[in-house]
Image (spheres, rainbow, N blue to C red):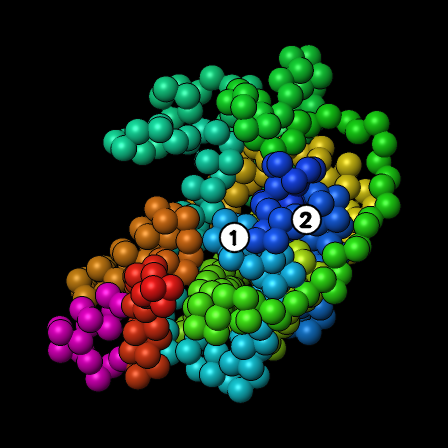
Amino acid sequence: MRGGLVTFVTMAYIVILNPLILGGFSADQAAVDVAGGWLPNAQVAAVTALTAGVMTILFGVIARLPFGFAAGLGINSFLAVSVVGQVTWAEAMGLVVINGLIIVLLASTGLRELIFNAVPRQLKIAITVGIGLFIAFIGLVDSGFVRSSGTASPPVQLGENGSVVSLPTTVFVIGLIILGILVARKVKAALLIGIVATTLIAVILEAIFKVGPSLGQNPNGWNLNAPVVPTSIVSLPDLSLVGQVSFGAFERIGVLAALMLVFTLVFTNFFDAMGTMTGLANEAGIADDKGNFPRLKSALIVEGVGAVMGGSTSASSNTVFIESGAGIGEGARTGLANVVTGLLFLAAMFFTPLTQIVPLEVAAAALVIVGAMMVSQIRFIDFSDFSIVLPVFLTILVMPLTYSIANGIGAGFISWVLVRSFSGKAREISPLLWIVAAGFLVFFVRGPIEALLGA
């Protein structure tokens, strides 16, 4: 139960962030579709909490694993930036539903599990380590500790001009130290205690200095939400977006172009989820010596259902969240943790103001701690064979540097089949891994392919 609470606290930001990506408070600052339509912020927030709650509980009850669900950040950004310029929002969500149905089909026929099992254990460990670095990098960026330099070299820097200058980033550092000490001393409920303590410090400092949110303009402000006690805590959810789905994209942009969009969604959804579940299972200590975990097929099917439901509610595809590692670090091992997290998400539909008390900088500190925990799995990698070292290295490195789990997995798969094959180990490679690697090759060059189709 404690783990479920911690998972919710580290995931709750999605109720605020997803509406900012998909929707807006007015048309001039929202992602407008090809027909001029846009999604109101409050409606997206309501369906985001609803879908996350239902899917998290469903996964906990069926798969009985402590992996929280919510709108995937990679896919929602892809929809807002790349898809709705060609189709309407309802049509974009129709593509998400189709993507989910394909994933459910692959999982229910056992093909998705076969692909999962075909991945070598060394790559599965590398995926866990890569995700650890990825979520730590997310935490460092969300906190403002690492920022874009605005130049080609170096592309990123420490804080502003190489210095930590903002109060929110200082709170992140304080939280990181508090959490690190509590975890190192093996204090029970270390993450929860650290998050609560750092949030209280943030609330006090905000009350004194009144920094306010950044709103994309103030680099010294809180990244997403300022830690202030809300004047009202209850708000009624607007669920008008539920069922706003259309399959007219194939008619609007053509079958081939629509299929390329679906292909991109499936690949991103499929392998992001596979990588995340692999990492979380290893972190929870429930994976076997091959990296597989109990009720794998059920987990993969429900994950596909998350995409279907996310599209059906206009919340975007729902998938396993790497932030669940925080709850696992707090002791979550079964689906009961998911039930707790899911119920809190459903409550968040009515208590949206309360979810804004914990600033993103505090959640970011917890992510860095969890990232450090996951990176410790690197001790199980065989570094004596360079045909293993290079694919493992690329898997680990590409994830944080491209901000994508799927990209890291793809780089690892392609390099594994090529390097291992030309090193005389081709017979050890599953034919399925060759097929998936070829698919990733298409995925990586989909830009020129889409341009060719457009021409």
Location of mark 1 (residue): 85
Q: Is residue 333 visible?
A: no
State the image coordinates of residue 117 (x, y, percent, origin top left): 42, 78
Residue farthest bottom in this picture: 109
- The amino acid at mark 1 is Gly
The magenta stretch is 413-429
- The amino acid at mark 2 is Leu
**Left or right position of 311 against 438:** right
In this view of the protein, which residue sits in the foreground, 154 or 183? 154
What kind of element bears circle 2?
A: strand
Q: Which mark is residue 336?
A: none
In this view of the protein, which residue sits in the foreground, 275 or 443? 443
**Left or right position of 210 against 168:** right
Residue at image position (31%, 51%) is 397
Residue at image position (69%, 53%) is 48
As drawn, 292 above or below 142: below
Dots 1 and 2: beta carbons under 8 Å?
Answer: no
Mark 1–mark 2 Cα distance, whole angstroms, equals 14 Å
Location of mark 2 (residue): 39
